[in-house]
Image (cartoon, helix red, strand yellow):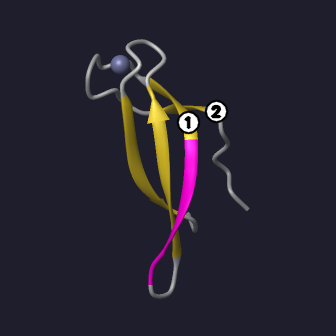
Amino acid sequence: MLHYQIGQLIQERCTSCYHNKLKIIKVTPREFSEKVAYNIWTQCPECGMNDHKLTQKDD
Ligand SMILES: [Zn+2]
């Protein structure tokens, strides 16, 4: 079960304006050999900067 949801704010630093929260705009699965990871696409609510990070399902 994904614990990341579209529209959710996560604690992450914007690389452009250094705002400390980013909004999730898209989540896409990425399959590796044995485990599933996700690309979390984020947007800064302050400056509109788009970014993404890779996260693993099991934590
Ligand atoms: Zn920003």
Q: Is residue 53 above or below residue 16?
A: below
Q: Is residue 21 left or right of residue 9?
A: left
Badge 1 crowding class, 10 Å Cα cut-off, few under 14, some 14 to 19, many 20 or more, is many
Query: At x 36% / y 24%, what residue is drawn?
Result: 49
**CB at disc 1 and ligand 1 closer than 8 Å:** no
Element under disc 2: loop
Q: Which mark is residue 15?
A: none
Specify the quarter for ligand 1: top left
User: Which dot marks residue 8?
Assistant: 2
22 with respect to 13 (left or right): right
Of 24 and 21, which appears nearest the observer?
24
In the rendered image, the quadrant that contains the C terminus is: bottom right
In the image, residue 54 lies at what x, y percent?
Answer: 41, 56
Does residue 30 belong to the magenta stretch? yes
Q: Based on the displayed image, in which of its 4 quarters is residue 29 positioned? A: bottom right
Span of residues in magenta: 26-32
Residue 52: give x, y in percent of width and height: 40, 44
Mark earlier in primary sequence (1, 2): 2
Q: What amino acid does circle 1 point to? A: Ile
Residue 9 image point, x, y percent: 58, 29
State how far apart marks 1 and 2 are (Cα).
5 Å
Q: Is residue 11 above or below residue 26?
A: above
Q: Nearer the viewer, residue 23 or 10?
A: 23
Disc marking residue 24: 1
If the image is split into quadrants, where does the N terminus sit? bottom right
Going by the image, does 16 lie left or right of 26?
A: left
| Image: 8 above or below 27 | above
Q: Residues within 10 Å of mark 2 (few under 14, many from 20)?
A: few
**CB under 8 Å between discs 1 and 2:** yes
Residue depicted at 42% across the width and 33% down the height: 12
Image quadrant of residue 25? top right
